[in-house]
Amino acid sequence: MNSANSPTPTPPSSTLSCATGRTRILTGDTPTGTLHLGHWVGSVKRRVELQSSHDCFFIIANMHAFTTRVDRAADIRRDSIEIVRDYLAMGIDPTKSAIFLQSEVPAIAELTFLFAMLLPFNRVMRNPTLKDEIKVKGLGETYSFGFPLYAVGQTADILAFRPTGVPVGEDQVPHLEMTREVARRFNQVFCGVSEHAEDGDHPQLGGTFPIPQADVGAVGRLMGTDGVNKMSKSLNNAIFIADPPKEIQKKVGKIFTGRQSPTDPGNIDNALFQYVDAFVTNPARVAELKDRYSRGDNLGDGHVKQEVAQAINELLEPMRARRSIYEGNDGLIIDILRDGCVRANVVAEETLAMVKDATKLAYFPRRLALG
Ligand code: ATP
Ligand code: MG
């Protein structure tokens, strides 16, 4: 990673190893907006921890953004670039991790079509995360065919990289469960793996895919500032990584707790105290705040909010500094994406070739080149 005071960030070199034999992980984000604190605690912090010891692939799921933003192509493009800036700000190092665009890895689309045959339609529609999204995003009955298809597509996003681990927030666990089902079914139908085989044994029994595991971050589901829903890019309840200090104070100040007075015994099972747990770094202070709040010991919400806002600003300050290096430099971001796409296509094409072998679709080798 270029450090905060490095004046001239350099694009990564695509000569970096694509296949080092290290354990591989895959995860990513949809450009339906930019990244927020939920992304940090649920997934990105874990990615930063893993990137030195694992081969990391981070997908910008830009095709999936069209499921809810079909009329906003320019916004999807802008947010794709901004999410890469957020990654760099948060400490993802493009010389270690491949950051790539879903739309430039065609094997993913090809695998989506095939995997759609391995999942019963009703199974997809029963996915609780999908159902929840239809409800909270107000999609009603008129969502596109592509909307439920994205859940199938996500199984392809993941399996194209044959990862063992997927760092995600809690809401993605049902998607990962579907991915595990697809991997098992593929290995059983096309590779002769017994349906009684243990998940961990699939690769050595000849299965194309390892059965990947969810790696949920320290806080699997950070609440939004509305105090009701999970923090989400599309629900107007998010504190963004790029928010300036004053905005953080304003947003934290609005967290709804429903408590009336500093002498009311407060319930610490609320969004505000989830933030205390997640962001106030001194454990003794966390314990003291919880104790006084729950006893109603003259500790107002306003005071707790001030400490939370300060803790969040301390977390974000080095990120702001790193982000400023990349501000206004879309060319560098696009270089990073191009390099990531080259590295991602090597692995995804290798997977596709294995899949074609297993499914008797391999007639001749195919080479993919990015111009
Ligand atoms: P959208 O509103 O478009 O669904 P989102 O804010 O839910 O956006 P995603 O791109 O769907 O973000 O999720 C990217 C990753 O971040 C996933 O692994 C997801 O589980 C994780 N994540 C998102 N929101 C939170 C949250 N509030 N707490 C913990 N993890 C989260
Ligand atoms: Mg989401």
Image: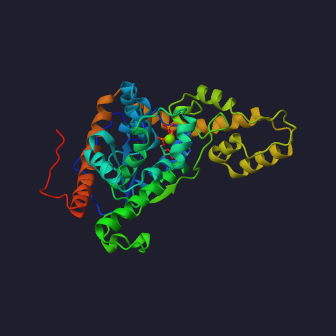
Quadrant for residue 258, please give it.
Answer: top right
- Picture layout, residue 217 above or below residue 257: below
Q: Where is residue 143 in the image (x, y as percent from the top left)?
A: 46, 34
What residue do we see at 68% from left, 29% from top? 254
Image location of residue 212, percent across then percent down? 42, 61
The outermost residue toward the left is: 364
Give the x, y percent position of residue 107.
26, 48
250 sits to left or right of 324 = right
Badge count: 0
Is residue 1 at all visible to an observer of this figure?
A: no
Nearer to us in this view, 107 or 222:
107
| Apparent side of residue 102 relative to residue 44 in the rendered image (left or right) | left
State the quadrant of the C terminus. top left
Q: In which quarter of the image is residue 145?
A: top left
Where is residue 354, by image quadrant? bottom left
Depth check: 99 or 118 in front? 118
